[in-house]
Every structure is written in C-alpha cells, then in structure tokens.
C-alpha cells in the first residue's frame, strides 16, 4: 500500500507539471488543448500576448497553492498543537485569552489536592520528532531534562543541567556517539548510565562525575520515562502494540494540549459516565465553546454513548478498561455504518490505549498520554496510528473528531476546582471506584502542592 501511495503521489506531481506547462505554453493558434485552440480563447477574452502570460502565471500560482493544500489534506499527517491559552478560556471585555488564563490560574481555588506526581511511565515526546543526533529540551514532572538520540539510534533521557557548572545540556549540547556533550566546557556524559567519560582539559575523569539518567523506554512510537518518588525501579512495563512495530499501523497525526488541572482529573473522566450524555451528546459540528454546543441550529446531529468502566484484576492491577459504544443519529435516524466500539485501556496514571476496530473504517490506535509539566499543568497528547491500507483521511477525521470532543473537556478542566469529597449520587459510584484505583500510584513520599504560588504568566 505504501508503494501504491508513493506511485499516486508521483502521478499527481507529473499531472500538475503537465497542466502548468500547457497553460504557460501559449505560442500560436496551432497549439491545441483538449481539441481546442486555447490561445484563441485568450484572444477572445482580450488577454492575448503579455497579459495572457501574466494571467496564466497567476492561475498557475493559485492552482499550485490549491493543489498543495489538497495534497496536505489527503496525504500529510494531521498535527494540531495547541498553546496553553488557546483552548478552554473565554476572552471577553477586550482581554486576550492569555490574560484570562493567567487570571483563572491565580484566582481559582485549588482544593485539597492528592499528590501531584503519581508513580508511573510518562510520555516525553513522539519518536518521529527525535532524529539521530537530535537533542531536545523538555520540561516534565517539574524537572528540566535533555532528550537525545545517539548515533546508533537509541533515545536517552538525562537531567538537563550539567553537574559541573549548571549549563543546560539541551541548549547547544551535541551528540557524540552514545554521549551528550556539554556546550559550556565539553564534558561528555554517557546516555545509558549518565557517567562522564571525557573532560577535554583534565587528565582523569572523577568516578563521581555523572548526571542523573532517567529510566526510559521507546515503544509504540513514543519515548517514555519512568518516575518514582523513591527512586524505585519500574514495577510494570508498557505493552507493545505489535501492529505499530511491524509497520502495519502507521502514523497519521497527533494533537497536543496543555491543561490547567491536577493530573487525576483527566483520567477520572473515564469513570464519569454521566458527563458523556450532557457534554458530548451534541454533534461535533456544534464546536467546542460550551456556550453554543447546545444550539438548536445543530441539534439534528447527536452522539449516543454507552460506557462501562472497570479496573483490571491481577496481575494487571495498574490497568483499567473502559468500553465505549458510540452511535450517531441525524434527524433522529441512526446511521449503523458509523457505529463505533472503542476499548480504552489505561496503563498506569499517564497512558491510555484507545483501540478502534470497525468493519468499514478499519483498525487503529490513539495513544492518549498525560504528562505533568508542573503540579497543575498537564501536557496531553493524542497520537494516532492506523492501518496503512485505509485512506489517511479516515484516521485524520477520527483524530479531528476526538480533538473536538476533548476540547470540550478542556474548557471544564481549565476552569474547575478539585473537590476531594464530592457530593455524589449512587449513579456516580464509578467515580469513587476510580479514585480508589488511582490512589495506588501514590506513595508516602509522593510530592504534594503545599500552597499555590504565582507561576510565570503565559
């Protein structure tokens, strides 16, 4: 299928080139285009000579722009990377979204919060964004880390600050073999264990010279790190999706959002079954602004949901599963072809596998990842991999629809407070079960937010 797709792209480029050549090649009346002497058409329109060529150039330029847009629409992955203040805030009275976001962060009550950094595996970045020899500066779990890919293709994660004099290894540092070199004095630190192996101006490297090396793993197109507040080794692993490893499912896009909330609020949505009927029933055509999603203009399109959430038994106590049955109705009529069953399997506090299996739309996976940037700021990404035999427009539409539904939640999360003892009815029992299940990722020394301080404005 990939060869076929490449062949189609080549044919498309050749066709575009031929069409432009015919448009520009205006010489005399013997030139024919689909049986018609097109220069005569230019003359009848009063565009003979130089004006005709100018018009042809403009037409060619517009055509190229349109074809480029069409090419990206059909073939390029969908990538929607939102800034921290772009979604979930209402800018009124002449204020910008950034001003509103900063006011919300300062004034909102934080509530009695659980620990802010649960123990588990977290996404650092997507594998395809880290080429051989690349170095990236990433903030996660309140720390600055340097992520680099060695010359043999292995990804490593180390503390960003050089223990010598504190230079940031990811800002100007370079990869040398399997090491990262400090941009300040040239100290080289080995990726696999953080050991300093070279100091250019010293005869001997001290045994104690090393930088912290984070336990990391690369799987399912993601670079992951393990965090445990006590420094314990990983107690479970992230399962491999073999279809991605074999290349049967290919990358079709990703979205990224920054959410101003405690990490537990986000996965708790899986157990909050009642919110689906209220927040996510309006059709995606009604948008993400909750002031207008229930507009009568779009009420003819409705999503129906049936959901069941449950934790998994031994030996997968760190996992839970949500079964989602989705149906679409238009003018009250159900469209069975668009019925979709999704299995959402959460693995630890920060990773969710959203598995799609449809007889017509094909099979694929969205990796939903939540990584704390700081105590009340989460980076949430959705990365989609889909059958390479399915046209890219299908998974891109699924990802876009997921993004719209997700951004409705973002508007809630960005403006709510965490309530440790919520007022629940019996139909909300799964929320308490989810909180008990999630508590396993906290331990006695898990860091807590003792007070809310003013962080930097966006």
Image (spheres, rainbow, N blue to C red):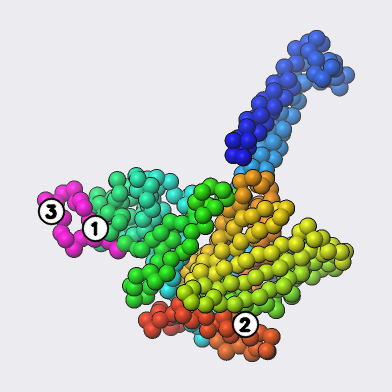
Which residue is located at x 22 percent, y 56 percent?
A: 196
Measured as percent of width and height from the top left, residue 69 is found at: 68, 41
Q: Which residue is tagged 2?
A: 430
Which of the marked residues, 3 or 1, is nearer the chain's N terminus? 1
Q: Secondary structure beneath disc 2? A: helix
Which of the marked residues, 2 or 3, is nearer the chain's N terminus? 3
Position of 361 with respect to 199 (left or right) is right
Q: State the CA–CA distance, disc 2 to disc 3.
A: 60 Å
Position of 255 with respect to 443 (left or right) is right
Relative to 29, residue 95 above or below: below
Q: Secondary structure beneath disc 1? A: loop
Q: Which residue is tagged 3?
A: 204
Locate residue 302: give its quadrant: bottom right
- Numbered badge on residue 195: 1
Measured as percent of width and height from the top left, residue 403 is found at: 65, 61
Q: Secondary structure beneath disc 3? A: loop
- Numbered badge on residue 424: none
Number of the front mark, 2 or 1: 2
Q: State the CA–CA distance, disc 2 to disc 1.
A: 47 Å
User: How many marks can you see?
Assistant: 3
Measured as percent of width and height from the top left, residue 128 is found at: 49, 49
Which of the marked residues, 2 or 1, is nearer the chain's N terminus? 1
**Chain part drawn in magenta:** 194-212
User: Which residue is at the front of the view, 435 or 359?
Assistant: 359
Would residue 111 be visible to someone looking at this image? no
């Amino acid at each position: 299928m990939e060869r076929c797709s490449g062949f189609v792209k080549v044919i498309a480029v050749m066709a575009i080139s031929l069409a432009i050549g015919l448009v520009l090649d205006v010489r005399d009346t013997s030139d024919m285009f689909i049986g018609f002497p097109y220069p005569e058409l230019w003359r009848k329109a009063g565009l003979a000579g130089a004006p005709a060529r100018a018009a042809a150039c403009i037409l060619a330029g517009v055509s190229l722009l349109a074809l480029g847009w069409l090419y990206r629409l059909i073939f390029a992955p969908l990538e929607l990377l939102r800034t921290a203040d772009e979604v979930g805030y209402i800018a009124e009275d002449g204020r910008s979204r950034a001003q509103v976001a900063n006011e919300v962060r300062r004034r909102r009550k934080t509530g009695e919060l659980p620990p802010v950094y649960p123990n588990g595996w977290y996404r650092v970045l997507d594998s395809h964004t880290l080429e051989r020899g690349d170095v990236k500066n990433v903030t996660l779990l309140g720390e600055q880390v340097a992520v680099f890919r060695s010359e043999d293709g292995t990804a490593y994660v180390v503390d960003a600050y050089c223990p010598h004099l504190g230079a940031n290894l990811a800002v100007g540092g370079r990869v040398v073999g399997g090491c990262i070199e400090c941009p300040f004095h040239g100290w080289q630190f080995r990726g696999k264990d953080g050991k300093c192996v070279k100091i250019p101006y010293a005869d001997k490297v001290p045994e104690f010279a090393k930088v912290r090396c984070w336990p990391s793993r690369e799987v399912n197109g993601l670079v992951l790190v393990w965090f445990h507040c006590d420094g314990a080794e990983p107690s479970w692993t992230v399962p491999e999706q073999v279809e991605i490893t074999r290349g049967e499912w290919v990358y079709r896009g990703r979205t990224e959002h920054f959410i101003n909330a405690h990490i537990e609020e986000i996965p708790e949505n899986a157990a909050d079954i009642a919110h689906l009927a209220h927040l996510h029933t309006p059709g995606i055509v009604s948008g993400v602004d909750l002031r207008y999603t229930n507009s009568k203009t779009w009420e003819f399109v409705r999503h129906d949901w049936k959901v069941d959430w449950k934790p998994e038994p031994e030996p997968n106590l760190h996992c839970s599963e949500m079964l989602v049955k989705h149906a679409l109705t238009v003018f009250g009529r159900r469209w069975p072809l668009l019925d979709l069953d999704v299995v959402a399997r959460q693995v630890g506090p920060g990773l969710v596998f959203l598995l799609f299996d449809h007889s017509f739309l094909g099979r694929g996976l969205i990796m939903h990842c939540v990584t704390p940037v700081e105590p009340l700021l989460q980076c949430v990404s959705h990365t989609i991999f889909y059958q390479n035999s399915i046209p890219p427009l299908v998974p891109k539409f699924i990802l876009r629809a997921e993004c719209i539904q997700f951004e409705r939640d973002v508007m809630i999360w960005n403006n709510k407070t965490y309530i440790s003892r919520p007022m629940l009815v019996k139909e909300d029992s799964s929320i308490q079960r989810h909180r008990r299940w999630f508590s396993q990722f906290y331990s006695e020394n898990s860091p807590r937010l003792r007070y809310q301080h003013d962080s930097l404005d966006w």
